[in-house]
Amino acid sequence: MILFCRLPSHCSRISKQIQNLPSPWENCTNGNLRRFSSYSRPACQEECYANFVLQRCQCQELYMNDSKAPYCSPAQLATCAYPARHMYTKPHNSTKVPCNCQNPCEDKVFADSISLATLSTNFYQDLAARYGKTESYWRENAAILQVYFPDLIEERVVHQKSFTVMSLFCNIGGVFGLVLGAGLISIVEIVDFCLTKTLCCCCKRNKRENNELQK
């Protein structure tokens, strides 16, 4: 986030929590990262870059949290680490470390918005009268920053299965009821009628055969 010090800045932040479905519905993971306590896609990409620098330079930059790797010296930063960063950001780089950063199954996203406005001349004159210095000094060095949440509400997005096994049976039953005009009781009655008709036919046939044998 970049702020302009000469202008009063108002920064608002909106929180959104996203819950994805696990495999096989979606490709999400809650995998463990070596340099970060919690998994996120940016953290995974940053770890891939750290592995790339470590593989090429045998050292890590100052902000990379790896207790097993030494930090790069100024000479190594200038001759190896910074050129490696430039090489890593190229779109077609065949020397990258294989990196498969999937979306996390649970993630919290913050959406930031910044608004800027100029301060009045009376404000700078009041600062100069109260604290000394010149008006031009306060124009160059004074800054106002207000950070706030516009709403005390957290948006929660939960991905759910659009079609479950129960939905499948409900749809099948609905189609049978619509096309055949029959419900579950009607289907049982049809099966009962077919069985009764079959048994009656078998009984009549056996009775006819017995009468023929007696003659």
Image (cartoon, helix red, strand yellow):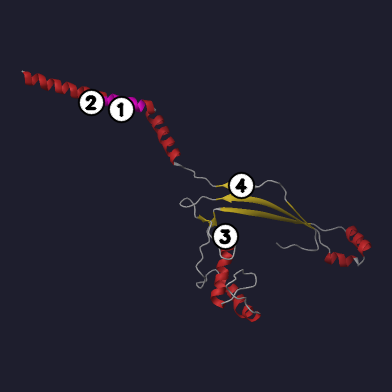
Q: Nearer the viewer, residue 157 or 58?
A: 58
Say whether residue 124 is left or right of residue 180. Answer: right
Cα–Cα span, label 3 and label 1: 57 Å
Image coordinates for residue 149, horizontal then vertical, percent? 72, 50
Residue 182 visible in the picture: no
Residue 191, label in figure: 1
In three-dimensional space, the C-alpha distance between marks 4 and 1, rounded to whole angstroms, equals: 49 Å
Identify the residue position indicated by label 2 in the image: 198
Amino acid beneath label 1: Val
Contact (CB < 8 A) between labels 2 and 4? Answer: no
Residue 76: quarter of image: bottom right
Check the image and report above or below for 154 versus 136.
above
Q: Which mark is residue 50?
A: none
The residue positioned farthest toward the front in the image shown? 67
* Earlier residue among tags 4 and 3: 3
Instruction: Tell me if 52 is positioned left or right of 6 in this view.
Output: left
Task: Point out which mark residue 41 bears.
Answer: 3
Instruction: Give the residue type that dot 4 points to.
Output: Arg
Q: Amino acid at mark 2?
A: Thr
The C terminus, quarter of image: top left
110 lies above or below 64: above
- Depth order, front residue of 78/93: 78
Q: Amino acid at mark 3?
A: Arg
Task: Identify the residue shown where x is 65% and y is 54%.
Answer: 110
Quarter occupied by residue 38: bottom right
Q: Residues within 10 Å of mark 3 (few under 14, many from 20)?
A: some
Split into 4 quadrants, where in the image is the N terminus?
A: bottom right
Crowd tier of the residue under label 2, counting other residues whose Cα lies within 10 Å: few below 14, some 14–19, many 20 or above: few
> 17 or 142, which lies in front?
17
- Kindly identify which residue carries mark 4: 156
